[in-house]
Image: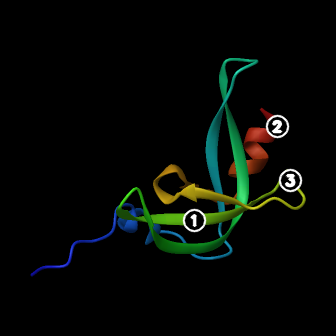
Amino acid sequence: MNEKEQFGELSAEEFNVGDIVQWTTWNKLSEEWDTNYGILMKLENVIRSNRMVSIATVKPLNEQFEEKELFTLSLKLVKTGEIDSEMTS
């Protein structure tokens, strides 16, 4: 039997622990998507809703203590200079 890759595993292959990543969250007040940045702390495959999926643990740059678990497919790797250019826009 061929073993299938876990859901989101292909996306996880482009990341390394320590990378700066971004993701978006919906802001109900402004009714726009907010961009968030963080440092990738851990990647792992876990069972969620009876299915093995790729989960990333991220330390947000704008929160002092709270780590977040995010679905790996929702992350985007930040390239050098992207944060600076967005913050000056």
For the point 62% across and 74% down, the residue is 42
Contact between labelled residues 1 and 3, with CB atoms less than 8 Å apart = no
For the point 63% across and 76% down, the residue is 17
Q: How is the image coloured?
A: rainbow
Secondary structure under tag 3 reads loop
Residue closer to the observer: 2 or 13: 2
| Image spot of residue 84 (x, y percent) | 78, 48
For label 3, the residue is 63
Q: What residue occupies the far left of the structure in this picture?
A: 1
The type of residue carrying mark 1 is Ala
For label 2, the residue is 88
Q: CA distance from mark 1 to mark 2?
A: 28 Å
For the point 46% across and 68% down, the residue is 12
For label 1, the residue is 56
The type of residue carrying mark 3 is Glu
Q: Nearer the viewer, mark 2 or mark 3?
A: 3
Q: Tell which circle, 3 or 1, labels the residue nearer the N-terminal end.
A: 1
